[in-house]
């Protein structure tokens, strides 16, 4: 059974069809890329999977559980997490708190203990703090734990966003343009990070990206969207030479 | 380094408890032996009530970043519910014993309504929530005015002066303690995350509905408590005591002291109440001077007296980063490439 | 039928005044994303300026109206420069609290100067005609005509002049527009002046219809006008006009069927219901949120 299955997913904003008849089967452990010109519907797709929008038509299932119609925090609890095109960290909160917020679902006390700080509250909070610090440590961010997230340099903010996304213990990680603004060397580092994270956290990863160095470098499979329509899908080598893809990006028929 | 943390904790807890107890004893002494004149005692009680109102509103407006402008409505519910209970519900002879029950009932009544007000907050934010809370304040006032059984626009009286300095002290400490606990818990982190970026918070697993509901319930509960204390201090309440002007007063205390800071709320409430009293000889002109002072303060310190900073002893050791955090496990540290 | 027309006339009168005030809220919000909670008190100052013009200066209606408009317009600009401008880059709530403070100051300063309510002498001889069972007063007609006239002027100004275009541009994007050579500060001051002037006009007209004025009269009216602006879609000028007439109609309707103490309550409740179905107001546009 595939881990994530999208069937005939269509989404309309008023008269505009952002995503048209999208189909996908993601097996556990896969690393796929979603590419396409700007406005092709890629981020909308992520928003549909994570529950920000409710798909106009179609079904999205995680381990055969229907996601469409569930609130985003329930979908996150089921195992889908993501990062954002424009970094959306909790800017005024500390680095540690950014991660701790994402552990909301993992906390094992209720309102009564929270209001009195009794009944196992301290033990649980210590556990959460320790887990979060460990996670930050794995991402080489532990030294910044007390720092305001907005004060971090751009590269570390991106890293923190990935660490935060992993704090929800996801099965699937959706990365939205993780390499934005990075140079060649930084992308190499990012490639290592993503592959390491996939192994250590046993993830299935889908990423949206424009930087072909990243996409062709690590994606096992690629899906190409244009104006909401899937125009091609397959292995990197096939996609690289697909005339439809070239036309979508370059705008004219190219003799291959 | 574990030892240092434990020592520090015990020390701080001991100090805090001792201080709080001393405060309680002081209040009892002041009230029993008349150590301060009645006027000063009255002011102190007003300060306490305003602290409860300010800290509870700060939870919604400061920490959660919403714009609730009808807080006096919850106060009104608490005042009327508790007053009705002591005047018409409980046997008069033992009303002093029933007082805490009445106050809690007032808080619960307000909290119940707080749940209703929380519902629109699930979908709207900002200016639209301001309208909802504004309308709520007006509706509460209008409803009270139309119920003859509680005196309508003429007001309700007959309450005994059950509010004493020790009681105000106890309730103030309780409200500050509970709200502070709430802030430094997963719900408090959820509240802050909602303020920063509600959509991202939801996507990271925060149950925003649950968090908002809890925040509104707690906030309105304590506003109701303050109302109950207020009713049994003044011994007379009418709908006009709880209108927009009152809500505006509370708003000012919140933003004066500093949003997102409990110490700020305490400071804001105290300085506002005391300043107003100090300026009383000016007559009606003090109400013209006070807002001027506020405007000047906002221009030079837009975030209020305390800004976003919190008083050290309110912050749990674990959140204070004074070297008290456990170091990450060596074998996993720096594992990422 | 006659009764209905009568009430419709009352609704138009009340709605016109609400609309004039609501316009000030919406214009300032559109250009600065700030709710000027002192605006209701500008309305009150307008009424008092009319009072001073009529009694101390003994002026007739038109000069009194002009003095009220000009006086409040100047006051609006002064407040903007002194209290709001320094807070343009501060968190929004600080500006709102400052506005509340300014409002409180205006109320209590006026209270200090005038501890008792004042009565505006009749500036216009009012004749009442009865047209097929409906009693129409010339005062009513005047209020409605002056208000509508001012609104039409505003609409033309905003839609057809360079300054109006600049106002709309700044409402769209405050950071980019100065780079194109638009004197933002001046445009903002003009916006405040116009909004305040309209509130001053509303105060005068209100004072004509209900001659007893007191320093706290702006509070309730101010909040109601704010709701009108939001119902119409805050930031939208035409929306504010529509919102004003809607609230006016709702109030008159409710007053016709319910005892007077229920009036505000039902009016607010109905507006809440409307906001539930159209959360951004009638002509408002949801802030598109890119995720």
Image (tube, rainbow, N blue to C red):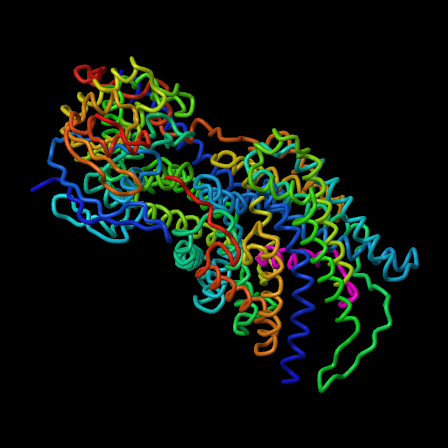
Whether residue A164 appears in magenta in the rendering, the answer is no
Q: Kindly identify the residue that appears in the image at 56 percent across and 45 percent down.
A: B251
Q: Quadrant of the C terminus of chain A?
A: top left
Percent x, y of residue B280? 72, 44
| Residue C210 is a magenta residue | yes
Specify the farthest residue to the bottom. C132
Q: Tell me, yes or no, if residue C212 can be seen here.
A: yes
Residue C242 vs C102, above or below: the answer is below
Residue at point 46%, 56% (across, down):
C279
Q: Give the range drawn in magenta.
A: C207-228
The image shows residue C154 at horizontal and vertical percentages of 70, 53
B75 sits left or right of A134 in the view: right
Residue occupying the far left of the picture: A1
When asked about the image quadrant of residue C232, the answer is bottom right
Residue C257 drawn at (x, y percent): 57, 79
Q: How many labels does the image show?
A: 0
Residue B99 point in image, percent of width and height: 45, 57
Image quadrant holding the N terminus of chain A, namely top left
Q: Please identify the quarter of the rendering in which residue B319 is found.
A: top left
* Viewer-nearest residue: B60 or B230: B60
Q: In this view, does C27 lie above or below C134?
A: above
As drawn, is B228 to the left or to the right of A63? Answer: right
Q: In the displayed image of the protein, which residue is found farthest to the top?
A: A185
Q: Which of C69 and A127 is in front in this view?
A: C69
**Foreground residue, B140 or B24?**
B140
Q: Is residue B332 above or below residue A176?
A: above
> What residue lies at 55% left-to-right and 63% top-to-bottom?
B141
Classified by dominant secondary structure, the portion drawn in magenta counts as helix
Q: Residue at x 29, y 19 (%)?
A: A142
Taking depth in this image into account, of C247 and B278 the one nearest to the observer is C247
């Amino acid at each position: 059974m595939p881990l994530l299955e999208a069937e005939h997913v269509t989404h309309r904003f008023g008269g505009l069809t952002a995503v048209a008849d999208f189909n996908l089967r993601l097996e556990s452990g896969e690393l796929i890329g979603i590419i396409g010109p700007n406005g092709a519907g890629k981020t909308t797709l992520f928003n549909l999977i994570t529950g920000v929008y409710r798909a106009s038509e179609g079904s999205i299932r995680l381990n055969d559980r229907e996601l469409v119609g569930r609130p985003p925090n329930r979908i996150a609890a089921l195992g889908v997490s993501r990062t954002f095109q424009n970094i959306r960290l909790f800017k005024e909160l500390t680095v540690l708190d950014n991660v701790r917020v994402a552990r909301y679902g993992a906390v094992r006390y209720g309102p009564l203990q929270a209001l009195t700080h009794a009944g196992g509250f301290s033990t649980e909070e210590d556990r959460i703090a320790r887990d979060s610090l460990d996670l930050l440590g794995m991402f080489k961010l532990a030294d910044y734990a007390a720092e305001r997230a907005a004060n971090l340099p751009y590269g570390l903010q991106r890293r923190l966003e990935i660490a935060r996304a992993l704090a929800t213990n996801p099965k699937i990680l959706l990365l939205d343009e993780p390499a934005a603004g990075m140079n060649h060397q930084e992308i190499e580092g990012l490639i290592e990070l993503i592959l390491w994270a996939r192994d250590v956290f046993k993830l299935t990863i889908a990423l949206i990206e424009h930087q072909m160095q990243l996409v062709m470098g690590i994606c096992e499979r690629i899906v190409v969207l244009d104006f909401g329509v899937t125009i091609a899908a397959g292995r990197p080598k096939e996609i690289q030479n697909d005339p439809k893809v070239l036309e979508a990006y370059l705008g004219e028929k190219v003799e291959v | 380094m574990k030892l240092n943390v434990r020592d520090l904790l015990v020390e701080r807890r001991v100090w805090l408890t001792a201080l709080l107890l001393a405060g309680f004893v002081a209040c009892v002494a002041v009230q029993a032996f008349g150590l301060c004149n009645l006027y000063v005692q009255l002011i102190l009680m007003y300060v306490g009530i305003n602290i409860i109102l300010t800290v509870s509103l700060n939870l919604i407006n400061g920490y959660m970043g919403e714009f609730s402008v009808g807080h006096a409505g919850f106060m009104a519910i608490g005042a009327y519910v508790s007053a009705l209970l002591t005047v018409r519900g409980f046997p008069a002879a033992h009303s002093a014993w029933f007082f805490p029950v009445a106050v809690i009932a007032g808080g619960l009544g307000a909290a119940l309504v707080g749940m209703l007000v929380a519902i629109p907050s699930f979908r709207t934010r900002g200016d639209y929530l301001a309208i909802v809370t504004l309308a709520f304040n007006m509706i509460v006032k209008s409803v009270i005015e139309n119920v003859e059984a509680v005196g309508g626009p003429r007001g309700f009286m007959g309450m005994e002066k059950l509010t004493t300095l020790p009681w105000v002290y106890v309730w103030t400490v309780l409200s500050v303690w509970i709200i502070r606990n709430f802030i430094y818990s997963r719900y408090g982190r959820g509240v802050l995350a909602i303020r920063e970026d509600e959509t991202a918070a939801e996507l990271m697993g925060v149950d925003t509905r649950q968090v908002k509901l809890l925040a509104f319930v707690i906030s309105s509960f304590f506003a109701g408590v303050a109302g109950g204390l207020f009713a049994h201090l003044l011994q007379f309440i009418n709908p006009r005591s709880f209108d927009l002007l009152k809500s505006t007063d509370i708003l000012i205390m919140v933003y004066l002291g500093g949003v997102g800071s409990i110490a700020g709320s305490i400071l804001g409430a105290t300085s506002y109440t005391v300043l107003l009293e100090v300026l009383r000889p000016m007559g009606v002109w003090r109400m013209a001077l006070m807002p001027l002072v506020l405007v000047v303060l906002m221009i030079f310190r837009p975030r209020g007296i305390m800004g976003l900073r919190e008083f050290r002893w309110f912050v749990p050791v674990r959140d204070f980063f004074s070297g008290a955090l456990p170091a990450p496990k060596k074998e996993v540290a720096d594992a990422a490439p | 039928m006659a009764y209905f027309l009568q009430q419709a006339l009352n609704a138009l009168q009340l709605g016109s005044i609400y609309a004039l005030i609501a316009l000030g809220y919406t214009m300032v919000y559109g250009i600065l994303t700030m709710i000027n909670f002192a605006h209701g008190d500008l309305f009150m100052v307008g009424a008092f300026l009319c009072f001073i013009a009529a009694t101390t200066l003994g002026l007739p209606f038109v000069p009194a109206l002009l003095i009220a408009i000009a006086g409040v317009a100047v006051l609006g600009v002064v407040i903007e420069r002194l209290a709001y401008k320094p807070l343009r880059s501060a968190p929004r709530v600080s500006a709102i609290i400052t506005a509340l403070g300014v409002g409180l100051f205006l109320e209590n300063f006026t209270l200090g100067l005038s501890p008792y309510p004042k009565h505006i002498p009749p500036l216009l001889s009012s004749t009442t005609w009865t047209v097929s069972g409906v009693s129409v007063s010339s005062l009513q007609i005047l209020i409605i005509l002056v208000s509508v006239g001012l609104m039409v002027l505003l609409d033309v100004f905003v839609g057809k002049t360079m300054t109006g275009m600049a106002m709309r541009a700044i409402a769209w994007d405050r950071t980019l527009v100065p780079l194109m050579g638009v004197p933002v500060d001046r445009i903002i001051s003009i916006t405040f002046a116009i909004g305040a002037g309209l509130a001053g006009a509303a105060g005068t007209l209100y004072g004509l219809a209900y001659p007893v004025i007191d320093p706290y009269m702006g509070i309730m009216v101010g909040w109601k006008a704010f709701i009108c602006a939001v119902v119409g879609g805050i930031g939208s000028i035409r929306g504010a006009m529509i919102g004003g007439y809607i609230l006016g109609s709702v109030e008159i309707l409710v007053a016709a069927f319910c005892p007077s103490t229920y009036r505000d309550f039902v009016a607010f409740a109905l507006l809440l219901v409307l906001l539930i179905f159209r959360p951004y107001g009638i002509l408002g546009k949801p802030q598109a949120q890119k995720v």
